[in-house]
Image: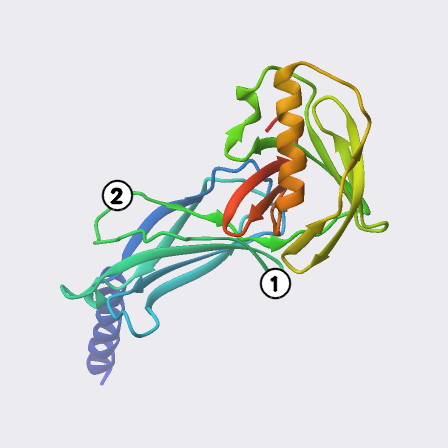
Amino acid sequence: MKGILVSASLGVLALGLSALSSADTLKGEVYYLPRIALPATAKVTVKLVDASKADAPSEVIASKEFSTEGKQVPIPFELDYEPSRLKATGRYQVQAQIWDGNQLRFTTTTAIPFAGGSAIVRVPVEPVAQPYKDATASVTFFATELEGTKLANYPGTRRVSLNLNSETMSYGGFAGVNTYGGSFKRDGFKIKFGPARATLMAGDEGSMKIERSLFKVLGEATTAKQFGKVLVLYRGNEIIFKGSTDLKD
């Protein structure tokens, strides 16, 4: 009887070891390029999915959620999966998301293929657009791009700025030569700037060109989206302004 029990126990153990040895580990890292710090409470979700069915949701092969524990990108991860679930007809991809509480902050926007193997998989994620919102009543964005042109390409001047005040629903800042101001309205992603009032100083042509471009942008902007510390204004689907709260950008 004891011999039978020992044999049975060894059989169960063998099956357990066989199941463990059948699992492979996908190793990779999640990263993004914008200089946006993650909160210490951020969590990462990583999935291995089969996206071969175009008319159906992707089938999840394996998934994992873990805390960043205060780490910043790139964030390494290991995801165990059963290689027997990878079929020759499948189209396998790695997806990742970064959450701050219930708010999705970053997500994959391009297909990251996976065909097995031990190579490290780098998974880029992009900021998720949010309607413009003030963390405080008044916030200033320093312009980095106007109508597709980097401001660094213009003759050097003081940093052009756009201040938005959600309490007074007013805007203002430095336009290149003059200070300016006005009022604005917003509804979700939609934004409408009223006419700008500005001082009447004259400057060099490069600085005046920046100023004319900024006022044109404010008059034509229809949408405002915020990606972390970056504000993006659109004319329809066209990006016409980028600004950051960080002077280093």
- Quadrant containing the C terminus is top right
Q: Position of residue 194 (x, y in %)?
A: 75, 47
Q: Residue furthest bottom?
A: 1
Residue at the disc numbered 1? 102
Closer mark to the observer between disc 1 and disc 2: 1
Label 1 Cα neighbours within 10 Å, binned few <14 / some 14-19 / many ≥20: few
Say if 59 sits above or below 68 in the image.
Answer: below
- Quadrant containing the N terminus is bottom left
Q: Considering depth in this image, is 85 or 138 the residue closer to the camera?
A: 138
Say if 200 sits above or below 24 in the image.
Answer: above
Q: Considering depth in this image, is 20 or 68 the residue closer to the camera?
A: 68
* Residue at the image position 69 percent from the left and 52 percent from the top: 192
Mark 1 touching mark 2, by CB under 8 A? no
Specify the amino acid type for callout 1.
Asn
Residue at the disc numbered 2? 119
Label 2 Cα neighbours within 10 Å, binned few <14 / some 14-19 / many ≥20: few
The answer to whether 208 appears left or right of 182 in the picture is left
Q: Residue furthest left?
A: 88
The answer to whether 89 appears left or right of 98 in the picture is left
Specify the amino acid type for callout 2.
Ala
Q: Is residue 69 visible?
A: no
**Element on which disc 2 rests:** loop
Q: Position of residue 83 (x, y in %)?
A: 22, 62
